[in-house]
Amino acid sequence: MLNKPEKHPQSVLGRFYVTEDCLACENCQLVAPNNFRYGKNGLSYVCKQPTNPEEVKQCEQAVADCPLEAVRSDGTQAGSNF
């Protein structure tokens, strides 16, 4: 059985998160620049959970675009974070 990837330790708590499988491709930061940054280890993390519908949409796109599925959502309904 494979180990579940760990969440990036700098990610803020909430619906969206980045696992340590991140390869620093910059996709999430390009799609949702208000919500993703590079951490001390050079990998992306969620610096701010979305606070409006546009940011939710951008974060959902970041999840869909991540080539390694390192950007994830816990599956709560859109809009529940604000």
Image: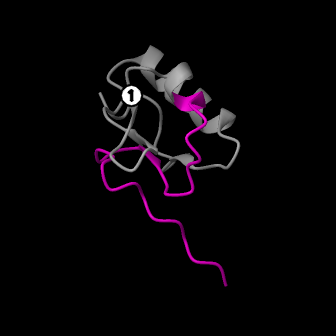
Q: Nearer the viewer, residue 74 or 31?
A: 31
Choose top left, top right, bottom left or bottom right for residue 51: top left
Residue 28 lies, with reference to residue 12, above or below; the image says above
Q: Residue at x 45, y 65 (%)?
A: 6
Q: Quadrant of the C terminus?
A: top left
Q: Nearer the viewer, residue 8 or 42?
A: 42
Q: Residue at x 43, y 44 (%)?
A: 42
Choose top left, top right, bottom left or bottom right for residue 63: top right
Expressed as whole percent of the image width and height from the top left, the position of residue 16 reads: 44, 42
Q: Residues within 10 Å of mark 1 (few under 14, many from 20)?
A: many
Q: Main secondary structure of the magenta part?
A: loop
Q: Which residues are magenta?
A: 1-28
Residue 40 lies, with reference to residue 54, above or below; the image says below
- Is 10 included in the stretch rendered in magenta? yes
Q: Residue at x 54, y 47 (%)?
A: 72
Q: As shown in the figure, which amino acid type bears the numbered disc 1?
A: Asn
Is 22 displayed left or right of 14 in the figure?
right
Expressed as whole percent of the image width and height from the top left, the position of residue 20 reads: 49, 57
Q: Quadrant of the N terminus?
A: bottom right
Q: Nearer the viewer, residue 78 or 25?
A: 25
Residue 78 lies, with reference to residue 13, above or below; the image says above
Q: Residue at x 47, y 38 (%)?
A: 77
Expressed as whole percent of the image width and height from the top left, the position of residue 64 reads: 66, 35
What residue did someone put label 1 on? 35
- Is 62 included in the stretch rendered in magenta? no
Is 68 displayed left or right of 70 in the figure?
right
**In what element is the residue under mark 1?**
loop
